[in-house]
Image (spheres, rainbow, N blue to C red):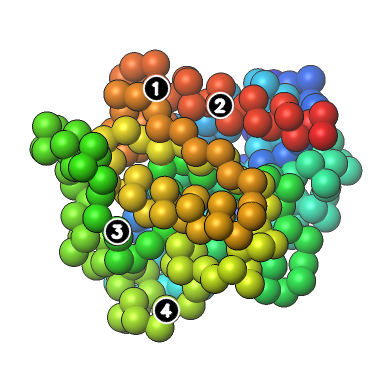
């Protein structure tokens, strides 16, 4: 793989694909909208792994929310800017516009899904694929299934996304109440009029992770709208497993799941 480099005035870091297959992925790390860098594993390691499998990855250094700055839609605007830059420079990046995906982990998954909804609202070119890894998509989470509740009860350290905490995260990101929040800020609320245009989606959730409930609920809404969606749970993992590639086989297994879907995109 060629060396990664910064572009778009530092908004993105580009990871050129090895033996590029024409696919591109605009990618956002997680961090509850307030943490994270381009150097964390679920940004840098993920991008290197996918680039080594032929996809050029454009990792987004979106603005993080602070006590006083960068409330919604700042980070979402950065995702849209990175998407537009990637499409504009697709030729020199070795990417085919019609084979360009968008995705992210946790809060980055929220940003990817929300940016896609905004593109649909605008009538702009949407991604060919949306890649979501253990995303947070609802400010008010559904109750976890009995199976998930049992996993969380058996691993108290994994049970860290209780409803009050998630709601507070969104309130901080929004700078106010979640009631009446813009749908792209809470993508799990999107209605059928938007979802019927949503791109094919691949979602990989962590195993013992309460955020699974919001991801699975969004997937059901996509299916109800007649959209293509593939959902997997990575066995034996907890939230953020792509940030811990040395912890076990889960992170690499997720990379292989995503890479396989991107290879399908390359030959579509």
Q: Which mark is residue 181?
A: 4
First in sequence: mark 1 or mark 2? 1
Measured as percent of width and height from the top left, residue 40 is found at 42, 37
Q: Position of residue 261 (x, y in %)?
A: 65, 31
Q: Earlier in the sequence, mark 1 or mark 4?
A: 4
Q: CA distance from mark 1 to mark 2?
A: 11 Å
Q: Are marks 4 and 2 in contact (CB under 8 Å)?
A: no
SS at mark 3 in the image? loop
Is residue 73 positioned above or below 268 on the image?
below
Tell which circle, 2 or 3, labels the residue nearer the N-terminal end. Answer: 3
Please tell me how crowded label 4 is: few (under 14), some (14-19), or many (20+) other residues with Cα within 10 Å.
some
Task: Mark yes or no: residue 27 visible.
Answer: no
Q: Determine the CA span between mark 1 and mark 4.
A: 34 Å
Q: Residues within 10 Å of mark 3 (few under 14, many from 20)?
A: some
* Residue positioned 46% across, 33% down in the render: 232
Single out the mark in the foreground, 3 or 1: 3
Residue that mark 3 sits on: 142
Q: Residue at x 58, y 31 (%)?
A: 258
Res. 24 image quadrant: top right
Residue annotated with mark 1:
250
The reply to whether the C-beta atoms of the residues labelled 1 and 2 are less than 8 Å apart is no
Q: Secondary structure at mark 4?
A: loop
Question: Going from the N terminus, do you reach mark 3 or mark 1 first?
Answer: 3
How packed mark 2 is, by other alpha carbons closer than 10 Å (few <14, some 14-19, many 20 or more), is: some
Calculate the distance from the C-alpha at mark 3 to the C-alpha at mark 4: 17 Å
Q: Earlier in the sequence, mark 3 or mark 4?
A: 3
Secondary structure type for disc 2: helix
- Give the mark nearest the N terminus, 4 or 2: 4
């Amino acid at each position: 793989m060629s060396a990664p480099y910064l572009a778009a005035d530092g908004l993105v870091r580009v990871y050129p694909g090895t033996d590029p297959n024409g696919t591109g992925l605009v990618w956002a790390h997680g961090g509850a909208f307030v943490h994270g860098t381009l150097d964390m594993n679920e940004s840098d390691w993920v991008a290197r792994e996918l680039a080594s499998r032929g996809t050029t990855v454009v990792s987004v250094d979106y603005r993080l929310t602070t006590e006083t700055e960068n409330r919604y839609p700042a980070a979402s605007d950065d995702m849209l800017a990175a998407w537009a830059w990637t499409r504009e420079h697709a030729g020199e990046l070795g990417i085919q516009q019609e084979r360009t995906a968008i995705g992210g982990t946790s809060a980055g998954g929220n940003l990817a899904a929300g940016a896609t909804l905004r593109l649909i609202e605008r009538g702009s070119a949407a991604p060919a694929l949306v890649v979501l890894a253990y995303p947070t998509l609802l400010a008010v989470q559904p109750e976890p299934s009995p199976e998930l509740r049992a996993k969380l009860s058996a691993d108290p350290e994994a049970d860290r996304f209780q409803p009050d905490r998630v709601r507070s995260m969104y309130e901080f990101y929004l700078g106010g109440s979640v009631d009446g929040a813009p749908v792209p800020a809470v993508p799990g609320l999107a209605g059928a009029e938007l979802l019927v245009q949503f791109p094919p989606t691949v979602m990989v959730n962590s195993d013992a992770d309460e955020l699974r409930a919001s991801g699975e609920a969004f997937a059901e809404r996509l299916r109800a709208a007649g959209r293509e969606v593939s959902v997997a749970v990575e066995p034996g993992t907890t939230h953020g497993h792509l940030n811990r590639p040395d912890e076990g086989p889960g992170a690499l297994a997720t990379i292989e799941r995503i890479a396989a879907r991107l290879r399908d995109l390359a030959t579509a």
